[in-house]
Amino acid sequence: MGHTNDPAVIERLMRTKGRWAIVGLTTNEWRAAYDVSLFIRDRLGMDIIPINLPGDPVHGETGYRTLDDIPAEKRPIDVVDCFVNSHLVGSVVDQAIAVGAKAVWLQLGVIDEEAAERAKAAGLDVVMNACPAQLAWKFGL
């Protein structure tokens, strides 16, 4: 049986102010991560940390190459939001577990049942194949 998103977990993650590391966030304005990250920061009130291969800053926020590169003063990471292809997300989930993240959020179209199970087994909350910007209205956000 596959992963089923828990609406209570989704609402808690979206309402609880915290730090979201957004993997795959670049300066490319045509990518979904660009606008969704602004929504997470400006509408939901979260701190965001861009994670991208060159470690470029985005939206005026310091960027890092990997989750492990995030300095101690910017931890713990509450949510690792994954804007990567499904075949790559397993390694991101494993990194999230390794750095002590509290949750992983796999964006629309990002599905990896085995990675979701590993995250749950490690005690992380998991949301898969969903977008906070599209779900916010359900919770009055």
Image (cartoon, rainbow, N blue to C red):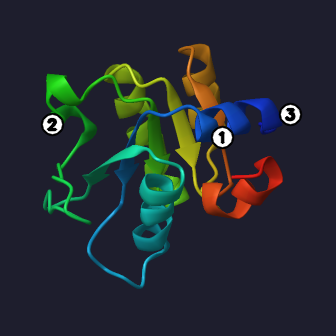
Nearer to me, 55 or 134:
134
Residue 19: horizontal and vertical position, in percent? Answer: 38, 36
- The amino acid type found where label 3 is placed reads Met
Q: Earlier in the sequence, mark 2 or mark 3?
A: 3
State which quadrant residue 76 falls in.
Answer: top left
In depth, the one of 107 and 20 nearer the eye is 20
Q: CA distance from mark 2 to mark 1?
A: 24 Å
Within 10 angstroms of label 1, few (less than 14), some, or many (20 or more) residues?
many
The single residue placed furthest to the right in the displayed view is 1
Residue 100: give x, y in percent of width and height: 37, 19
Instruction: Classify residue 92 by image quadrant.
Output: top left
Would you say residue 96 is visible in this rendering?
yes
- Residue at which label 3 appears: 1
Mark 1 vs 3: CB contact within 8 A: no
Residue 127: image tag:
1
10 Å crowding of disc 2: few (<14), some (14-19), many (20+): few
- Where does residue 9 sit, x and y in percent of width and height? 71, 31
Q: Residue at 53%, 15% (x, y): give it.
A: 122
Kind of element beneath mark 2: helix
SS class of the residue under badge 1? strand
**Of the two numbered discs 2 and 3 in the rendering, the one whose residue sits closer to the viewer:** 2
Q: What label sits on residue 69 in the rendered view?
A: 2
Amino acid residing under circle 1: Val
Q: Is residue 45 left or right of residue 6?
A: left
Q: Amino acid at mark 2?
A: Asp
Pointers 2 and 1 in contact (C-beta within 8 Å)? no
